[in-house]
């Protein structure tokens, strides 16, 4: 069974721009969660989608948004990029809320 | 406030020198505890899930145990390929939703 895939793997943007990241979950998984990972803060939860609905949200500003499609694929958008948004963005999928989350390889975003 | 603390932050071991990593937590409504391994620049790789105090799981040189307040990841006779950051995460119930809270990890280096 194919794992979680994320595209693109690397991105370089400048301050003020916006970016969209994509995540394809493991086949059959309906829950997709997004995390931001930085050296100083570790893994921070952004939001979770289940069956196209946002089910849970972390403490990030409204510039961070997401959505999920009917095929469970998910996108995350960050608008008006700031230098502090530079991070590894990880997507994880699971079959349900209490099940194990399996992570993708991440998208490395650098904001200049 | 829900919190997950891992210790030590970094650990250097000689090949074959067994040791343990600690994950202590203070959460209400524990639903599960997860261990992941993360290599530099990659997404976390799932290792174990533990659900109740007294539970143990083993995989090759790794063994995870759980008590009511903490979990240990025991590494027996480690090899250089075990070098990685080991992350602990706790799934907690809060305001009728589940959330996964990560510790900041233990960076393990095993020298030949």
Image: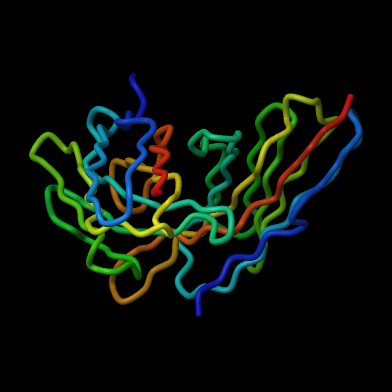
Left of B18 or right of it: where is B97? left
Question: What colouring style does the render use?
Answer: rainbow
Q: Please say if A15 is above or below A101.
A: below
Q: Position of residue A23 (x, y in %)?
A: 27, 36
Write the residue at 81% across / 47% down: B11
Write the residue at 54% across / 56% down: A42
Left of B50 or right of it: where is A18? left
Badge count: 0
**Closer to the camera in the image, B46 or B83:** B83
Q: Residue furthest top?
A: A1
Left of B80 or right of it: where is A103? left
Q: Position of residue A49 (x, y in %)?
A: 21, 52
Q: Please say if B3 is above or below A65.
A: below
For residue B36, what is the image quadrant?
top right
Q: Residue furthest left?
A: A70
For residue B95, what is the image quadrant?
bottom left
For residue A8, what is the image quadrant?
top left
Write the residue at 32% across / 28% down: A5
């Amino acid at each position: 069974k194919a794992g979680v895939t994320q595209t693109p793997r690397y991105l370089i943007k400048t301050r003020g721009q916006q970016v969209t990241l994509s995540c394809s979950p493991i086949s059959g998984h309906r829950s997709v969660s997004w995390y931001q990972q930085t050296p100083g803060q570790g893994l921070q939860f952004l939001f979770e989608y289940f069956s196209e609905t946002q089910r849970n949200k972390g403490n990030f500003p409204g510039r961070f948004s997401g959505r999920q499609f009917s095929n469970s694929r998910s996108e995350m958008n960050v608008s008006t990029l700031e230098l502090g948004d530079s991070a590894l963005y990880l997507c994880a999928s699971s079959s349900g809320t209490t099940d194990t989350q399996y992570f993708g390889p991440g998208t490395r975003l650098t904001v200049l | 406030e829900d919190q997950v603390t891992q210790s030590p932050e970094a650990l250097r071991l000689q090949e074959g020198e067994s040791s343990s990593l600690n994950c202590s937590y203070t959460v209400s409504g524990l639903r599960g505890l997860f261990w992941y391994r993360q290599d530099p620049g990659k997404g976390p790789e799932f290792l174990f899930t533990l659900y109740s105090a007294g539970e143990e799981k083993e995989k090759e040189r790794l063994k995870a145990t759980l008590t009511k307040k903490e979990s240990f990841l025991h590494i027996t006779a480690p090899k250089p390929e075990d070098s990685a950051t080991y992350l602990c995460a706790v799934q907690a119930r809060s305001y009728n939703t589940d959330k996964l809270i990560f510790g900041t990890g233990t960076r393990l280096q095993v020298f030949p």
